Image (tube, rainbow, N blue to C red):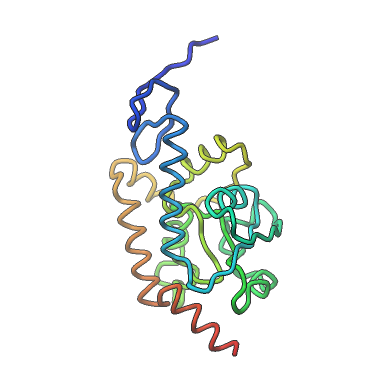
């Protein structure tokens, strides 16, 4: 059996088996702490003022929500694994109806790669901004991390990862570009958020519009 290679963790300097997060090699403990801090900050910045809990569709979303929001009401609605990282899940009327008004947010296990692929695939289409960002009643949990980092987190937390959507030519081309320009995905994600806000409003504005329409 090959000996395990130990490296110094970039955060705590402990010699351990390390995994990558945003270009740094981290031990298991530091990886989980940094990973969950990144996604928690993004989620909290996107929560409407009147959110009342979560609807979770898959084991990884349930694990994250229970880890970061231990006291939040959670309703588990299992969906086909292949659908929870697909744009089609955001068009399921039954799900949207379950979160109508001041109901819970629908938690999706979307990663940064999924958001970028959605943007590239719908670029130039009228009204294509609707699924971008975090429009209530949806909240995309893993937008600040890559698919590979999400899969590592799932392995360390011992939950199954939701399978990614089918690759597209545009997403593959961007991934090849990002391999030599590591800052590109972060810059593009910021641009996507700006476009979504300009076209659709902030999550709080979208939520208040929906409440007015439903009243």
As rendered, which of 64 and 213 lies closer to the eye?
64
Q: Is residue 111 left or right of residue 183?
A: right
Q: Residue 169, can we see it?
A: no
Q: Is residue 70 left or right of residue 180?
A: right
As rendered, which of 187 and 101 lies closer to the eye?
101
Q: Residue 129, can we see it?
A: yes
Expressed as whole percent of the image width and height from the top left, the position of residue 82 reads 64, 52
Expressed as whole percent of the image width and height from the top left, the position of residue 177 reads 33, 46
Q: Residue at x 42, y 48 (%)?
A: 37
Expressed as whole percent of the image width and height from the top left, the position of residue 85 reads 57, 55
The image quadrant where one finds the N terminus is top right
The image quadrant where one finds the C terminus is bottom right
Expressed as whole percent of the image width and height from the top left, the position of residue 211 reads 55, 84
Q: Residue at x 51, y 11 (%)?
A: 2
Q: Is residue 124 left or right of residue 151?
A: left
Which residue is at the far front? 71
Residue 160 higher or lower than 76, as above or below? above
Total numbered labels placed on residues in the image:
0
Q: Residue at x 38, y 73 (%)?
A: 197
């Amino acid at each position: 059996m090959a000996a395990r290679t130990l490296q110094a963790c970039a955060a705590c300097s402990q010699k351990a088996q390390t995994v990558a997060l945003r270009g740094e090699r981290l031990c298991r403990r530091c990886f989980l702490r940094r990973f969950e801090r990144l996604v928690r900050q993004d989620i909290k910045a996107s929560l409407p003022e009147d959110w009342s809990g979560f609807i979770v569709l898959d084991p990884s979303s349930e694990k994250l929500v229970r880890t970061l929001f231990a006291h939040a009401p959670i309703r588990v609605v299992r969906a086909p694994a292949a659908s929870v990282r697909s744009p089609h899940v955001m068009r399921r009327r039954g799900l949207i109806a379950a979160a109508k008004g001041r109901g819970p947010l629908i938690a999706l296990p979307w990663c940064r790669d999924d958001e970028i692929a959605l943007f590239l695939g719908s670029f130039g289409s009228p009204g294509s901004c609707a699924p971008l960002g975090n429009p209530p009643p949806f909240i995309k949990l893993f937008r600040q991390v890559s698919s590979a980092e999400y899969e590592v987190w799932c392995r360390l937390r011992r939950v199954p990862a939701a399978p990614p959507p089918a690759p597209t030519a545009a997403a593959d081309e961007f991934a090849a570009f990002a391999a030599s320009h590591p800052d590109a995905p972060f810059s593009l994600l910021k641009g996507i958020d700006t476009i979504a806000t300009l076209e659709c409003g902030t999550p709080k504005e979208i939520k208040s519009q929906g409440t007015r329409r439903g009243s």
